[in-house]
Image: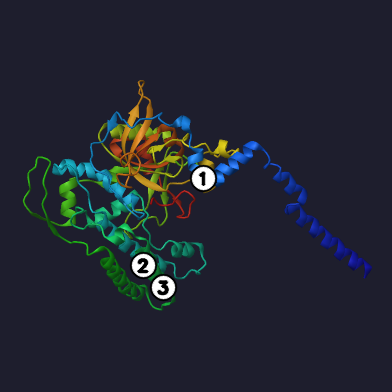
Amino acid sequence: MKHILFFLASFIFSILISFGQKTLTEKQLKEIESAYNQNDAYMKAVTNSVSNNTIGKLALNRQNIGKFDHQFKYKVKTNGITDQESSGRCWMFTSLNVMRPKAMQSLNLPMFEYSENYLYFWDIFEKSNLFLENIIETRGKKIDDREVEWLFNNVVGDGGVWNSFTNLADKYGLVPKEVMPETHSSENTRMMVRLIRRKLRGDALNLRNMKGTDDVLRQAKINMLKDVYKMLCINLGVPPSEFIWRYKNKDGNLTPFKKYTPKSFMKESLGDINFSDYIMLMDDPSKEYYKLYEIKKDRNVLEGKNWKFINLPAKEIKQYALKSLQNNEAMYFSCDVGKQLNRDEGLLDTENYDYESLFGVKFDMNKKERILSHESGSTHGMALTGADVDQTGKITKWLLENSWGKSSGHNGYLTMTDRWFNEYMFRVVILKKFIDEKILKILNQKPIMLPPWDPMFQEDK
């Protein structure tokens, strides 16, 4: 009995010792507390300042103010700033803003805007169909399977990327903004999307519990999509299958009324455009460069294309981006816009804010480490429309046409320094003709398939 008691006592003591090693002791807490000396005059001043003010204003680096102007040697010819309002449709606005200069030139217009609401309607509708199809496909898996969990967590939403736009435009065409203008729900999407998600999640559970063949389930899916379509029409209006439109060109001449379908209007405004001529290049140092990647289930249309990209270092992407701008071609561009953004100045620069000096700590992760730790990833899409170079021809800064309205940034634009480009740029979509042949050959590789929950692959909003 004594031996048993001794064994139990020893066992419990060993557990306590082990537990004690993991928890913070009083001595360790004292050591940690010594890092902050509340009687130190500087520490008092910093505490008073930060606890009573906005951190961004206190960390603003005054030495960086006025170092960069908003002039650019190369700038795409366009006009007008769009506004996505309270929605996550930046990728759609950006894609249409890339197309806008082509339409203005083709139609001889001083200003023009495609209808974002029209494409948004079909985006949410197609995402709903895709979600329900994925539920049918995975109904044999448990509800807590990682793929099924991901589906229920990512039902439908505003976000997307370049291929989301091309999938929609190829299938549904484009219309002028006047034909299907914005509504309160298109500019304030949160409640509408929340209710559609709620409806689809309930439908998905019903599909998973339903007995019958795939054909039986798909007929049930059609009835479910009728409800989604009705909700979208109530919120956004009915998308036109044809329309009559006229316009006044930049010479002041009013064109006669003409009947269009969305596809015929896209052809008239963009010509025989082939979206497969546009290649997405990414700089993701957490993955091997000079490889082709594809993201599983990352599309908005069932028969559409997944997100696919060539992974390249930023310094190479810049060469092709500059060629594009020198030839008056805007590009889809996405980045981690919230990092070091000075909204008042309309400037993206790595030296805008000095948080290290303010708090006396180091923030020293590199781009790869920020991606792997989920500290950084692409959050917002904008149109890359300009670049500036110094006397030696070296790129110094870039121009981004944003979709936050004219009052945001510098008259609706953001100036991005080249060093910021290196750290927080993630995606640029560039025409094939501006990319080296050796890089284009990478498209012949079998894509490395990545899961949709990869730390890098959040959609632009």
Q: Amino acid at mark 1?
A: Asn
Q: Quadrant of residue 323?
A: top left
Q: Position of residue 412 (x, y in %)?
A: 31, 42
Name the residue located 73 percent from the left edge and 53 percent from the top edge: 22
Of the two numbered discs 1 and 3 on the same chain, state the one appearing first in sequence.
Answer: 1
Q: Amino acid at mark 3?
A: Gly
Most extreme residue toward the top is 392
Q: Quadrant of residue 435?
A: top left
Q: Is residue 346 left or right of residue 118?
A: right
Query: Which label was assigned to residue 260?
Result: none
Q: Quadrant of residue 309?
A: top left
Q: Is residue 409 left or right of residue 29?
A: left
Q: Is residue 127 left or right of residue 50?
A: left
User: Gap in Å between the C-alphas at discs 2 and 1?
Assistant: 40 Å
Name the residue located 46 percent from the left edge and 40 percent from the top edge: 340
Residue 323 shows in the view? yes
Q: Which residue is tagged 2?
A: 196
Of the two numbered discs 3 and 2 on the same chain, state the one appearing first in sequence.
Answer: 2
Q: Which residue is tagged 1?
A: 53
Q: Which residue is tagged 3?
A: 202
Name the residue located 54 percent from the left edge and 42 percent from the top edge: 369
- Badge 2 local density, few (<14 within 10 Å), some, or many (20+)? many
Q: Nearer the viewer, residue 12 or 204?
A: 12
In the depicted structure, whether residue 156 falls above or below residue 374: below
